[in-house]
Amino acid sequence: MVRIAYHMMSAPPPIGLLFLARTSKGLRYVEFMDRKSLKRMIAAHEADAPDAVWEPSLLDVKNVTEQLEAYFLGTLREFELPLDPVGSEFQLKVWRALGRIPYGETRTYGEIATSVGQPKASRAVGLANHDNPIAIVTPCHRVIGANRQLTGYGGGLHRKRWLLEHEARQLRPVGKQGDLFAVAGGSSGRRTSR
């Protein structure tokens, strides 16, 4: 029997409500509650593991919520969580490759395909991204099109854009061009836009 502890977490807009679930081995799901395929993903999981017992529990996912909160505050760049996703051998390879994309950087679907030894499988990488059950922690939002443009994201392009912009903001030095505000005049405390 597999015990799956789950909890819902509120994240800043436009991220919204997240569904979190973990087994004794590690994190199984971080998914957007309004994602249409969430029910399908859980149903497929239940079909593969009919003996699974789902139990609501904040305590079991406390470390997950704390790390996600720190990520959203901009104080955490790398998650340190054991993962326990369910997927095909190819999907698992892709998801591990996603986990190696540094914070604030992007890779193309083709680059990920090459990194998993399947250079012609960029479309299959896109499908694996779409089926990634551990959003944000396994950063499929960092994968972009060959033309360097934002392309599909299971949680919606508005969220993908927000996540990438959030990471970029955290990497900018305070007071450098591109910041929305910088302290002017040192001790005056006045803020000015650049």
Image: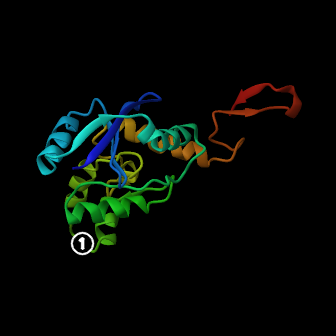
- Is residue 152 visible in the rendered image? The answer is no
Which residue in the protein does label 1 denote? 118
Q: Which colour scheme is used?
A: rainbow
x, y percent for residue 144: 35, 53
**Residue type pointed to by label 1:** Gln
Q: Which residue is drawn at 25% across and 71% down?
A: 119
Q: Which residue is drawn at 38% across and 34% down?
A: 57
The image quadrant of residue 157 is: top left
x, y percent for residue 67: 51, 44
Looking at the picture, does residue 95 appear above or below residue 3? below
Q: What element carries label 1?
A: loop
Q: Residue at x 19, y 35 (%)?
A: 39
- Is residue 14 visible in the rendered image? The answer is yes
x, y percent for residue 184: 80, 32
Is 15 in front, or is 52? 52
The image quadrant of residue 113 is: bottom left
Question: Would residue 108 be found to the left or right of residue 62 on screen?
Answer: left
